[in-house]
Image: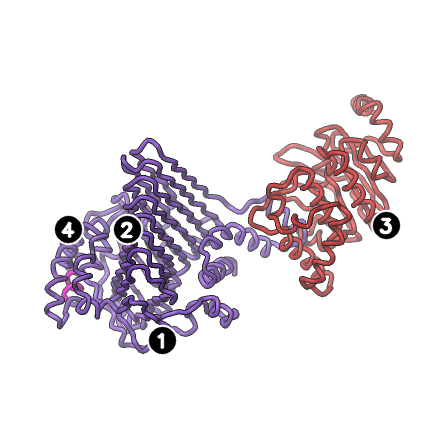
Chain colours: A purple, B red
Amino acid sequence: MNDRSDATLTRERPMSYDARSARNTSTVTKDATLSTDTATKDWTNDLRARHRDAFETQGVPTTKNEEWKYTNVRAIRDWEFKTATGAVGVPSVSPFLLGNVGDSAAGDADTNAGKVARLVFVDGQFAPNLSDLSAWTDNGARLAPMSEALTTDRDELESRLGTLQGDGSYPFASLNAANFTDGVYLHVPKNADVETNIHIVHTASGSATTNNAAVNLSCPRSLFVIEEGARVRIIEDYQAHAEGNYLVAPVTEVFVGANAQVEHFKVNRDSGSVHHIAATFARLDRDSHFHTNNISRGGKLVRNDLRVVLSGSGCECVLNGLNVGHDQQLMDDHTEIVHEVAHCASREFYKSILDDEAQGVFNGKVHVVQDAQKTDGIQSNNALILSDKALMNTKPQLEIFADDVRCTHGATIGQLDEAAFFYLRSRGIPRREATKILVQAFAGDVIERMNYAPMEAIAQEAVSKVLS
Amino acid sequence: MLEIRNLHVEADGNKILNGLDLTVKAGDVHAIMGPNGSGKSTLAHVIAGREEYEVTDGSITFMGKDLLEMEPEERAHAGVFLAFQYPVEIPGVNNTYFLKAAVNSVRKEQGLDELDAVDFLKLVKEKLKVLHMEESLLNRPVNDGFSGGEKKRNEIFQMAVLEPKLAILDETDSGLDIDALKDVANGVNALRDEGRGFLVVTHYQRLLNYIVPDFVHVLYKGKIARSGGKELALELEEKGYSEIEEAALSGK
């Protein structure tokens, strides 16, 4: 382990939970649940209370917790939270729309993006004035902010919300469940082919700067229910460009019906002061496909818990990940794929590029129950370390109880290939460009797998910024 | 063009070159022969700028400039080219992209306009023909999954495209079948002219039937033990290196 005293998140000796954080978070809980809609409050109360108890009992995890061994979030225990209001300053999202990557050929990229419906959230709250739903053609599908759906779609929400999250073993997901007020609710009915790509933008108002003592907490909560035979593409895009301290703790639950196809993207391009601790849960019915692509390049600390349960035979999940870390960023992916039944396939390809003093963590669980015969699982995690002080911790974790399966895993951590580097330079390619070529080559295959031009462009841009 | 004086080189604390002297004039083809471990490949890599080798004494001057002070890419810009004995596989980097980056880096340093895609493609297609290479090679990753012969052809192809002033071939012939050997030799011979020097490092005399050298040097224990004309290669083929070894041992 790399013990750096100057790191923002210091690795001091793990301490047990103390009462302070419980006090802080219960303050948040009270504030955040001040809903005027008493009916809504009633039916969500049980969910909120359960997770508030779970969170308060465990507290902020320490590095003694195996799932948090390499990601020290101790500092969070001492934070005073306030729920961000979105009142101070309205952020501009226009330079960061889907496909609009930096200054490069925005027009072309937007064309590649296809039809896009955009929901923008500021500090976790739906901002209708920044959103654009004009391209949305519903096909009988329902797309609404969670704050509205809690009332209007109560039956569906009540039967689904929190069920994939389960118990309190994800502390920050519990924090979310206790405090959420908004997010996205999507319901796509049977056989609907949704042509409009759904772009969900989470940004920040910068109100944190008005009170430096408090950390803005936002807990976006989304539920996507994709019924049998339906198809949809969803992009969750975190891009808080404001200064100030933020803790963003999103939770997304995805129900993928039989033979349905869901293409899911999660992008983090937050500014460097954001702590982002997210959990995504998906459950797949038979013959369905769930592809999730995760790009992280922003934030101070980005933790993604991703749990996919393959619950019907013949279904397939593909998990792609690309992390590009600089400075003292920490990027942690904890994935879990549960093969509950026979004849399912899982594919997982994660890559990290770490420069400066950045740290990466990958923990990939694949759980194959006894009845899940003929499981076909491939997992790989590769990290490219560009500086002496960058650090990667990787841990494949296969738990296989069936006896007729194919499950492979591979993990590599390496530096730039010196021989290749010299070869390029010996042909006249300068040091800097040679490095770029090799870094791009490293990331190339996972970017291609993402298979949606605007996201590939965002990934390329992240990679090209490595050495600039 | 190239002047090497009293070159001493170490790697991992082992002395590999011990006072080597060599002069290559523009237009000349020099063959460097010698038994395994005599320092042939080290010499090739030191000229190209490989950092693992430590030059402890001596000098290398290339067209009036101190080569040892230059980065590998600067040497390439000045016109030095090394055809690798073991060309490096670079998965994920397209051969065309790589070569275009190389050509344009060199052109830029030489004050020339960068080639656009059309001109570049025209140039490479011409050169491919000389080496009997498939165009499909252009779209494959650099050397990735290439056969031994394809890799060596690719080296000579790069040389043909980059048109260096000094080309060093490090055992390019090793392991080649006769057809590939002829293609490689044709590629080299097509580039031979008054302004260009060649340093052909080889273990076998056979290559020199196709690339006829002006001078042959025998490297032994890090020094040039003997120099002569092309007939020296034939003599070595017949008698082997034992005579040279004996002469060196007796302190002659």
Type of amino acid at the residue the image marks with label 2:
Arg
Per the image, the residue denoted by label 4 is A57
Residue for badge 1: A134
In the picture of the structure, the residue carrying the numbered disc 2 is A283
Chain for disc number 1: A
- Spatial CA distance of label 3 from label 1 is 68 Å
Q: Are marks 3 and 1 in contact (CB under 8 Å)?
A: no
Label 3's element? Answer: loop
Q: Residue at horizontal 20%, vertical 59%?
A: A177
**Residues rendered magenta in the picture:** A26-30
Q: Quadrant of residue A396?
A: top left
For the point 51% across and 46% down, the residue is A415
Label 1, residues with CA under 10 Å away: few <14, some 14-19, many ≥20 = few
Residue behind mark 3: B193
Mark 4 and mark 1 residues within 8 Å of each other at the beta carbon:
no
Going from N to C along the chain, the mark reached first, 4 or 2, is 4
Residue at the image position 70 percent from the left and 58 percent from the top: B121
Closer to viewer: mark 2 or mark 3: 2
The residue positioned farthest toward the front in the image shown: A191
